[in-house]
Image: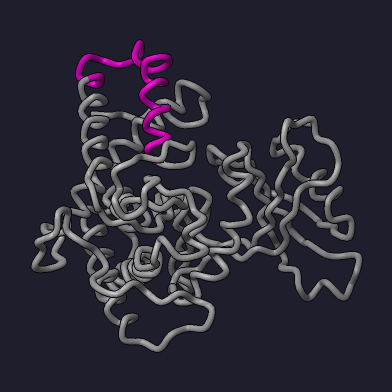
Amino acid sequence: MAISIETIPEMVARTWRDLEWTGQRVPKQGIDHAVVILDGLRSKEYELNDMLPESVVVRVPFEEEYRTQAMLESSLIAQLFRRTKVRVPGTVRQAYARGTFNTAEPVMLTMQTEVLGQPLSAELWQSLSASQRAWVAEQLGSLLATMHAFDPDVLPISRVDSWWSDGAATSTLNRVPRTLPGKLELMKQRVVEVVDPHLSAAETDFVERVFAQVDDMLARPYQQRALNHGELHEDHMLWTAEGGVGVIDFSDMTVGDPALDYAHFAGISPSLPGMVYEQAIIQHEQRRQAPAVPGVPPPMPGPLYRAPGGGRTSESTEDTDVLRRAAVYKDWDNIFLLIDHYRTGRSPRVELL
């Protein structure tokens, strides 16, 4: 039995034999996990029902690098996001699936609370009031002020895959599959193998230029390292009028350039990156003055963002260069999606120019 949305319910039934449910839904699927939502969840051991939400999201990673990350992901969300103002999923149950499913490696099941809402698309943004837009920026700024301020060399964050293997020096790239350097190396191969025949001359020049820009950014010595969400695009940011923004799918967390987390905001609104950046700076400064939260690592001392090469006199976007780098990472991600389109058909054909 291969991993698919059709096989997940049987995996759940075999693994947690006390559970039953009344219905199931299939949400929009991503690239690295199969996902199913189970409704009307109940336990046959009735004393456990108070511990179960009405609906749960069951996620099953396709690849080994995401299976091994799953428990760490759950631990980080539980430990690190007590201060953030966004809604995040909680882990309800997690285990390797019982039984044989005709897979090369054991199957990891993660059952999470469902974060409700509509994708924070450009169309949705247009419908929001000025106060609602400010709330979005405040919540996302809270998330990034939390994630980007943790010391990457302290547990549990030091267990997260880093883009560099030599710590603060950032001179030796770590090309394991989950890191951006690892993905970039594989992308360069797959562009030649899969994508080149479909590109115009202008698109080929664009791809080469973006790869060169990312290479240059990765090669900067002693640059800032931060815990990244990795995929803060509209499908992973869910809006409700009552709860504001909920953020899902932390499976691509790595330690790398914090600019990556700003890459998709401009596609929602050209003003959103600057709004979130300003809120992240403000909330970081507030947290530095606030009492410690038990069980949550304190933010690192000093400003939230550093300028490349030092010499910064402020945290303006011009000095830190965060938003310029974010635009390059957005171009890089479009190439990533284009490769996935021609390899698997799961992603739509992205226009590069």
What stretch of residues is rendered in magenta?
180-204
Image x and y of residue 163, in percent: 38, 45
Query: In the image, is 211 to the left or to the right of 144?
Result: left
The residue at 49%/53% (across/down) is 160
Q: Which quadrant is home to the C terminus? A: top left
Query: In the image, is 263 to the left or to the right of 22?
Result: left
The residue at 57%/41% (across/down) is 65
State whether the magenta stretch is mostly helix, strand or loop: helix
User: Please, which residue is most extreme toward the top here?
Assistant: 197
Vertical position of residue 5 compared to residue 287: above or below:
above
Is there any visible trace of residue 333 in the rendered image?
Answer: yes
Q: Which quadrant is home to the N terminus? A: top right
Query: In the image, is 172 to the left or to the right of 67?
Result: left
Number of numbered tags placed on the structure image:
0
Nearer-the-camera pick, 333 or 26: 333
Is there any visible trace of residue 268 in the rendered image?
Answer: no
Residue 216 drawn in magenta: no
Nearer-the-camera pick, 180 or 36: 180
Image x and y of residue 21, in percent: 81, 57
Vertical position of residue 274 compared to residue 139: above or below:
above
Image x and y of residue 142, in percent: 37, 71
